[in-house]
Image (cartoon, helix red, strand yellow):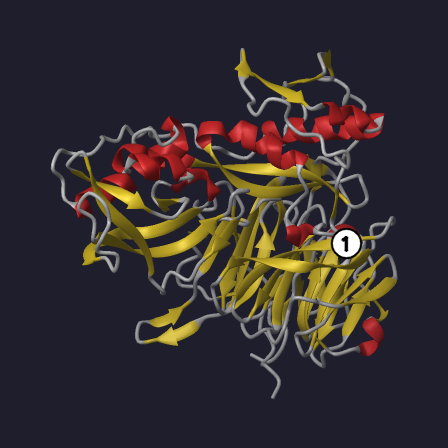
Amino acid sequence: MRTPRIPRALAACACLVALVAPAACSSPIGLPSAGGVQEYAPVSQQTKRVYTNPEGPVADDQPEGIVEGFFNAMPAGVQSDGYRVAREFLTPAASSGWKGDTSAVVYDGTPVFTRKASAQTGSPEGGGIVVEAELSVIGTLDSHGLYTPSDASQSTVMTFTMAKSDGQWRISRLDDGVAVSSADFDQVFRQVSVYRLDASGSRLVPDVRWLSWRNWRTLAVRETLENGSSWLSGAVRDVNDANATLAVDSVPLDNGTPRIQLSADFLRLGSDERALLVRLIRLTLGDGVASSRIEVTCEGNDYSDIDGSVDLVDQQPSVGLYTLTDGRVVSLGSSSPLRVGETGYESVDGFVFSKSGGAVLRDDGVVACLKADASPCGVMFDGTRMSFIAAGTDGEVWAVDASGHSLYVSRGGEERHLSVPWLGDRAIRAVTVSPEGARLAVAVDDGVLLTGVARDGDLTPAGLSDKATAVSLQRGVTMLTFYNDLNLVYVTEPEENESGTVQRAFRQIAPGPPEDQRLPSGATVVALASGQVALYRRLAVLDGGGTVRSVSGSLDGSWSIADSQVTALGEQ
């Protein structure tokens, strides 16, 4: 049985838009691919961090208190003191072997500490006791700062073996890595966009990492010199094929300028590759600002300014918002809605549009293209039945087939079928493309994933990366969009319970911990988009009553009405 059509329609425009219907059908939304450009705004970093000053062990404290004190000291170890205080809770042998920076678990709430008898009763100096810490883990970080969400409904237990050292209880055995509460997370870890070069060699791709504030610049340069995340395989290009490394494993500041000393392998790179690598380091340390000052040396020679002629697309396109009203396309790009043209389709299940044209998902599942004046121009994808359509970069149209197991894309009149190697038995419910076009966010049955988009020399999508990374385990997501190059916003389908209709929305630096996104009160959202309204980037939603509202800035501001005249697209 076919899902009922969406009663209202909104269109968003640009390389990152897609509106989704509440039941796995995409809702009318479009994206533009031409027009002005907007600079990438530097990522807003936490400037008012709270520096913790934990205390060491209390004399004659019990095992549970020692482990709790260790938990209280770990955040300061990541942030500032290099685990100086945290190691006071360990025996000398455990302290010398424990490595805190190898990984991290991020937990919510308060740990529960329980003393238990150890199976190893013959431990030296009064052993035979373990303390278990039960946590609600929401995510993990690996040694490269890559974030992966965890199922918080399943409690995690960390075990600490205790022993007496000079008559005092201390931790004698523990796993490497740290545990940090969600409240402390952004105080001790810094979000860093490690910039990569896309496969075409012309566009920048942010590879999001979470690095310790204590030495984030050193870690960031080290990650820039290494290959990108595995889920970006094929979508980004390695410019450091000579495997240049840091000659000194430190990036100090000299009068506010980071000083990077590279190994002699840097000189084995061609002049173009050296310049590109310096530019990527500059952007990574400068949060995307190409004018950031750095000092780069190798074998005593200065290479700080060799990237002056590097020409990369470090701007994201200006994108518009469109609605579809009784077959008419209306632009919301300015304060006054502007009629674009007539589509001839008064009943559709999906809509994407840009200045170069777009497409509609007809109620029979067939995708039909639209010209720049909104007039129809034929059937797309050989009439294959689709369940969802979305817009990509430069006028692309992406489509999910009716089974939810295949993707199709059209760019410049060329259509391709893309396999999804990591999908398994799951079905795709919605997709959205990042502003630069190298990343694809995919809503599936059990969450949201990110994968890379490989492109040919003419930027036509050629395939997806053979891996994907989970950014959310939230079920029921039916609409999602990139608000900008880093922030992903997604909304679940509405559900009925004893309290009425419940619908949840989230936003997050992807991949990273999610935050709740407030939706307009009293409205059921049926479509989601991001774009430009009166020159400001806005997040827009369409409710079931035909009203488009938008919000900008922190995304927690007041929702304003952008269009209240969106009429029915089908039966009421």
Mark 1, residue position: 454
Determine which quarter of the picture holds residue 502: bottom left
Q: How many marks?
A: 1
* Image quarter in which the C terminus is found: bottom right
User: 135 above or below 421?
Assistant: above
- Residue 165 position by quadrant: top left
Q: Residue at x 29, y 42 (%)?
A: 71
Residue 558 location in percent, x, y?
Answer: 43, 47
Q: Viewed as shown, does residue 557 lie left or right of 199? A: left
The residue nearer to you, when weighing 133 against 450, is 133
Q: Quadrant of the N terminus?
A: bottom right
Callout 1 secondary element = strand
Indicate the position of residue 369 as horizontal and vertical percent values: 81, 66
Which residue, as the protein is rendered here, is positioned at the far left? 60
Which residue occupies the foreground of this view, 459 or 278?
Answer: 278
Three-letter code for the amino acid on which mark 1 is drawn? Ala
**Quadrant of the image occupied by residue 184:** top left
- Rendered view: 326 above or below 276: below
Foreground of the two, 493 or 148: 148
